[in-house]
Image: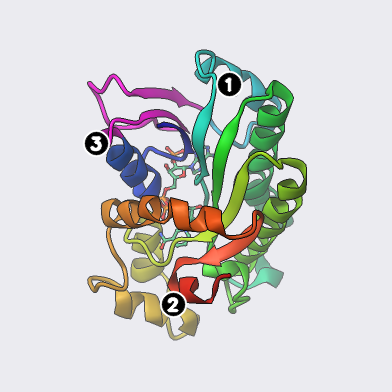
Amino acid sequence: MNVLITGNSGGLGLGLTKTLLERDAIVWGMSRSGCPVHDNDGLRDRRFDLSNLNTLPEALERLLSDCLRLDLVVLNAGILGKIHEISETDVHDLEHMMRINVWSNKVILDWIIERQLPVEQILAISSGAAVNMNYGWGGYSLSKACLNNLVELYAHEMPDSHLTALAPGLVDTAMQDYLCGEVDSEEFPSVQKLKDARGTDAMPGPDQAAGMILDLLAELRKGESGQFVDVRKLGDHG
Ligand SMILES: NC(=O)c1ccc[n+]([C@@H]2O[C@H](COP(=O)([O-])OP(=O)(O)OC[C@H]3O[C@@H](n4cnc5c(N)ncnc54)[C@H](OP(=O)(O)O)[C@@H]3O)[C@@H](O)[C@H]2O)c1
């Protein structure tokens, strides 16, 4: 299996990378700090800041120079930003978040189309925040809502690939270190359920979440391309 994963230096992206390598996949990865997996012939990794949209196509060309087809692309890299009022959020911080959470994914999809690289399945890692506009989640919610719509739009233009915007459920990563450790749930009540979930089955670690996502791939392909799917509501998805 040939797989491209963005944001594979930690969290869910690293969990996916390790799980796929264990299953003998070839993984092409891209993140700023680099994937910490060493001594694995299946991994081709490139350090790159995805907010550099102008040079992203060149970085993709270098990373994937020997790749003739991909079974899976996981557009996973993302940032949360600070939980605070949207009216207090600097528009430049929002722009930066949109570059990483949305526009880098557009550039990657455009590059795949331009290069005519066959790709069977594409997962853009979204979030329940894409539909829950909870108080304080402004920039992140906006970016994930935009990502869902981006995926729906690209599904029209990539008829030979199956696209899903996938909310992975809660995953115990650095993002949760910030949400559970630093955000005041009295000020932002939506964070309390994350604090309650941490350490329980409702918030698996990245390796477990990765296995669950990979085991869902075939089921996701049965649904219409371009949909938003929340793993916690999979029974509702047609
Ligand atoms: N954790 C959850 O409960 C949860 C829930 C719903 C959705 N998600 C989504 O799941 C995805 C993974 O999140 P996570 O929880 O695993 O977060 P994480 O542990 O913070 O990992 C984020 C990854 O994105 C990469 N990244 C961030 N900015 C980047 C940039 N400018 N250029 C290149 N790579 C960049 C990071 O690598 P570098 O820092 O090395 O660049 C890292 O590998 C995100 O899209 C997130 O929104 C997570």
**Residue tagged 2:** 191
- In the rendered image, residue 99, in percent from the top left (x then y), is placed at 66, 44
Residue 142 position by quadrant: bottom right
Q: Marks 1/3: CA distance? A: 26 Å
Q: Which residues are magenta?
A: 21-48
Q: For mark 1, what is the residue?
A: 59
Q: Are marks 1 and 2 in contact (CB under 8 Å)?
A: no
Tell me the residue at 66%/55% (across/down): 226
107 in magenta: no
Q: Residues within 10 Å of mark 3 (few under 14, many from 20)?
A: few
For label 3, the residue is: 22
Residue 174 in sight from this viewpoint = yes
Front-most of 134 and 109? 109
Work out how far the residue at label 1 is from the one at label 2, CA to CA, in angstroms.
37 Å
Q: Quadrant of the C terminus?
A: bottom right
The three-letter code of the residue at mark 2 reads Val
Label 2 CB sits under 8 Å from any ligand 1 atom: no
The kind of residue tagged 1 is Ala
* Residue 123 relative to residue 16: left or right: right
Q: Residues within 10 Å of mark 2 (few under 14, many from 20)?
A: many
Residue 202 position within the rendered picture, expressed as x and y whole percent measured from the top left: 31, 73
